[in-house]
């Protein structure tokens, strides 16, 4: 009896591997094409630490049967964020007990790799491009040919899933949109246990994360599973800043450090010391994003290509906002569920290529309708988060101990704030409510004029704890961009 062709997954990062693991649990044939030369090589230079959220990243692992393995690695004592301004004032730590435990990106990838049979992954297969034949009929298994940099080609797939990241080679088949540089970049260094600044990092950051910023400059520090710290120096600079010949050319470490330190010249000495001590080699991370408008219904810059779809950064590249890997893994779950829904609808156990192609196309269409809406919101949220992180008073803090009752009280509080302004547009960017854990977080943006006539563009994040009787205690408000509550 004929069987469906395998699904091709291009890219072995968290979302591609999550999708593969879900397919594995359902007995659906697939193959992963990964550019890294081996599993050992795959574990190098995989970035910092990630916080996996309960309803997205953790849910994907739960459905994949990996939540127990995840809990063995999850650092639930590392959910805190210490925030201060660039002079070291207004320090505040919050987030303790949040259902978003940390895990090194390296560990997450290894966890997923360990869950897959070795023969499912084709290493050293860097995609050069993807071509679609003129063969009639959508979703046909012979429609797409993958061309790799080693000169080989592969074709005959049931579905091609591009999970190949920011510079996806699958994406151009669907959209001409290219990642645009945001004007900002992070430069990554390290504070190891033997570093003179290690004790200071441990005292300030502990097991969690730290953020300090001012206009055009930010400093993030996070602890890894090996107890070392990653230091992320965020700058508003040209994309050429760290390239050979650039002002901060990282091939010349002394020159690069001197150039970066100029941006921290007026920072508090205890914060600037982390830049001075950050160990090499430094890794530049220019922040790119896709245009959020391509995800609108009817956009001419997004084509529904039968038999092909995208996951994660390949689908909706955004600058960091704490949700990237979570939404990517959730993409994998939504696509998997859409495919399984079509499998359940089948009236016959016999495989018919044409019927299957139509069913797969329905699944992709359902997935992309969901993904595009989430992707656009994700990018818009990342822009707001990015602006807040690089704002002049982006880490100004106001602590309060006001008690409200019920979720509606949050909206009442926000409405009261808007009422105290003359012509403010108020947008609730996101609200996360974890009733079981008793945690609430909201993010808002206020745009317009204050009563004194001054222009205002303010972001704030509210973090709440909910007691057993349902009363909400406001823990902290994080504001940026010209707060009227100063």
Image: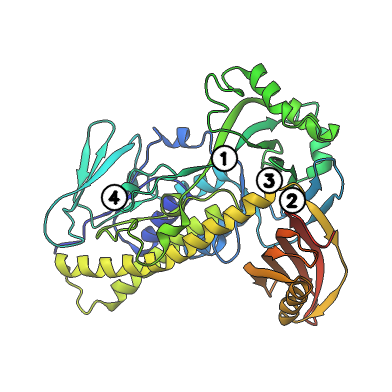
Q: Would you name the residue on which mark 4 appears?
A: 173
Picture coordinates of residue 65, whole percent (x, y): 49, 62
Q: Would you name the residue on which mark 2 appears?
A: 394
Q: Quadrant of residue 482?
A: bottom right
Residue 313 against residue 258 in the figure, above or below: below
Picture coordinates of residue 268, whole percent (x, y): 84, 35
- Could you tell me which residue is drawn at 51 percent across and 60 percent down? 61
Discs 2/4, front: 2
Which circle marks residue 162 in the picture?
A: none
Q: Residues within 10 Å of mark 2 (few under 14, many from 20)?
A: many
Q: Earlier in the sequence, mark 1 or mark 3?
A: 1
How far apart, in angstroms, are the residues tagged by discs 1 and 3? 11 Å
How far apart, in angstroms, are the residues tagged by discs 2 and 4? 39 Å
Closest to the observer: 295 or 226? 295
Q: Secondary structure at mark 4?
A: helix
Picture coordinates of residue 471, whole percent (x, y): 80, 79
| Residue 278 showing in the rendered view | no
How far apart, in angstroms, are the residues tagged by discs 3 and 4? 34 Å
Which circle marks residue 183 in the picture?
A: 1
Task: Kindly indicate whether the residue at mark 2 contacts the one at mark 3 (C-beta within 8 angstroms).
Answer: yes
Discs 3/4, front: 3
Q: Secondary structure at mark 2?
A: loop
């Amino acid at each position: 009896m004929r069987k469906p062709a395998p699904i091709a997954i291009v890219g072995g990062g968290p979302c591609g591997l999550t999708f593969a693991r879900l397919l594995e649990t359902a007995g659906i044939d697939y193959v992963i094409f990964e550019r890294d030369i081996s599993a050992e090589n795959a574990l190098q230079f995989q970035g910092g630490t990630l916080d996996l959220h309960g309803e997205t990243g953790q849910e994907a692992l739960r459905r994949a049967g990996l939540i127990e393995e995840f809990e063995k690695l999850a650092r639930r004592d590392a959910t805190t964020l210490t925030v201060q301004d660039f002079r070291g004032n207004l320090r505040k730590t919050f987030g303790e007990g949040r259902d978003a435990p940390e895990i090194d990106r390296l560990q997450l990838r290894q966890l997923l790799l360990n869950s897959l049979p070795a023969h499912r992954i084709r290493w050293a297969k860097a995609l050069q491009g993807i071509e679609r034949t003129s063969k009639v009929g959508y979703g046909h298994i012979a429609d797409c040919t993958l061309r790799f940099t080693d000169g080989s080609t592969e074709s005959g797939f049931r579905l091609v899933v591009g999970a190949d990241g920011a510079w996806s080679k699958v994406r151009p088949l669907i959209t001409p949109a290219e990642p645009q540089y945001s004007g900002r970049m992070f430069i990554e260094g390290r504070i190891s246990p033997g570093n003179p600044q290690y004790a200071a990092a441990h005292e300030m950051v502990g097991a969690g994360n730290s953020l300090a910023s001012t206009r055009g400059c930010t400093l993030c520090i996070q602890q890894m599973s090996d107890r070392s710290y990653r230091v992320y120096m965020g700058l508003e600079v040209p994309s050429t800043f760290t390239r050979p010949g650039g002002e901060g050319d990282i091939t010349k470490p002394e020159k690069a450090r001197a150039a970066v330190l100029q941006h921290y010249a007026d920072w508090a000495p205890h914060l600037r010391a982390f830049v001075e001590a950050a160990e090499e080699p430094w890794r530049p991370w220019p922040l790119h994003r896709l245009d959020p408008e391509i995800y609108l219904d009817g956009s001419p810059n997004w084509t529904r290509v039968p038999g092909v779809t995208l996951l994660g950064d390949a689908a909706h590249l955004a600058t960091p906002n704490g949700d990237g890997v979570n939404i990517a893994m959730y993409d994998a779950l939504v696509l998997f569920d859409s495919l399984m829904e079509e499998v359940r609808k089948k009236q016959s156990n016999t495989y018919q290529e044409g019927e299957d192609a139509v069913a797969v196309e329905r699944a992709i269409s359902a997935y992309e309708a969901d993904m595009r809406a989430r992707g656009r919101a994700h990018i818009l949220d990342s822009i707001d988060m990015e602006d807040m992180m690089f704002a002049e008073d982006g880490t100004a803090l106001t602590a309060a101990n006001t008690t409200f009752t019920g979720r509606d009280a949050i909206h009442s509080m926000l409405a009261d704030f808007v009422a105290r302004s003359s012509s403010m547009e108020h947008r609730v960017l996101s609200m996360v409510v974890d009733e079981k854990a008793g945690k609430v977080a909201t993010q808002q943006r206020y745009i317009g004029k204050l009563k004194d006539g001054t222009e205002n563009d303010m972001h704030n994040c509210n973090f709440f704890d909910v007691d057993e009787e349902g009363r909400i205690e406001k823990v902290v408000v994080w504001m940026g961009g010209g707060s009227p509550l100063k």
